[in-house]
Amino acid sequence: MPRITAAHEQAVRQRIVDAAVGVFGELGYERATVQDVVRASGLSVGAVYSYFRSKEELFVVACACEMEEQKAQLRLRMAELGPLPDRLRAAVDFAVASAMEDGYERSFRAHSWTHAAESPELRQILRDRHTEMVAFSRLVLQEALVRGELPAWIDADRIASAFVTLIDGFVVRTIEAADLSTEEARREAYSLLELLLAAPSAAPEAVARLRAPTAASAS
């Protein structure tokens, strides 16, 4: 009997995960079954269960793989870019493309957020992804502050978190507006980037007023 290599096992496992992303994206977690994944993968029931013990495990692993792929692609797109505007545009272009170009992957991400309420493990995966993407975005902004591309009063931590939220928000936006075009979504995001890049070098009074707690929030 020929020996099964680690590379072969990894290829089969990835085939199952890829099939799961399509199935869960099309049907959602509740409606999808392991048998649906079996059919989509072209493998046997035994082969799928030899890698994944349950639908829950398969969904969580598929989510983790998709999150890692998204982070890797974003880092790759931005790694060789220099000026801040180019880096931010690359991030927005990536966000819009990933939200709008592939319906199954977009729906799969939305289903992962929904099912996270029932799965502590999945919630942790999503939290880790958010933390890592915020850290990466923060690094981009901090480098821009050092180079003088952004004014010193900019809060890199909060803007980085808001920027990652913006990226995820495009998934929701495309679900809400089925007729939203890629170009329209890109223009919406660019308009926020323009505000950031046009920030005046000194605006301490306006920033202080904006960050000060209101009477309602203080009570």
Image (cartoon, rainbow, N blue to C red):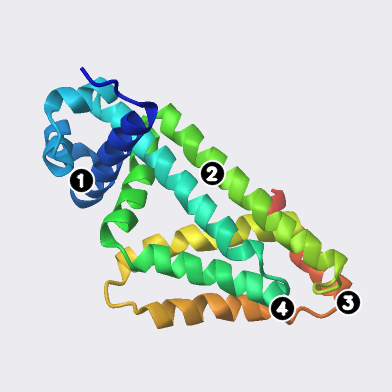
Do we see residue 35 in this rendering?
Answer: yes
Residue annotated with mark 2: 129
> Between disc 4 and disc 2, whose residue precedes?
2
Residue type of the residue flagged with mark 1: Val
Q: Disc 4 and disc 1: Cα gap in Å?
A: 41 Å
Residue annotated with mark 4: 197
Residue type of the residue flagged with mark 4: Leu
Residue 184, position as x, y percentages in the image: 42, 82
Q: Secondary structure at mark 2?
A: helix
Residue annotated with mark 1: 23
> Between disc 3 and disc 4, whose residue precedes?
4
Residue closest to the far front: 2
Instruction: Give the residue displayed 32% in from the left and 37% down from the top.
Output: 11
Q: Nearer the viewer, mark 3 or mark 4?
A: 4
Asked if the residues shown at circle 3 and circle 2 are in contact, with their CB atoms under 8 angstroms apart, the answer is: no
**Along the line of sight, the residue nearer the viewer: 41 or 95:** 41
Q: For this view, does 154 lie left or right of residue 48?
A: right
Instruction: Locate the N terminus by quadrant.
Output: top left
Residue type of the residue flagged with mark 2: Arg
Instruction: Give the residue displayed 66% in from the left and 53% down from the top.
Output: 136
Q: Nearer the viewer, mark 3 or mark 1?
A: 1
Q: Check the image and report above or below for 193 versus 60.
A: below
Question: Residue 202 has which mark?
Answer: 3
Residue type of the residue flagged with mark 3: Ala
Q: Check the image and report above or below for 163 versus 67.
A: below
Q: Disc 3 and disc 4: Cα gap in Å?
A: 13 Å
Asked if the residues shown at circle 4 and circle 2 are in contact, with their CB atoms under 8 angstroms apart, the answer is: no
Instruction: Give the residue displayed 31% in from the left and 72% down from the top.
Output: 177
Instruction: Give the residue displayed 47% in from the left and 78% down from the top.
Output: 186
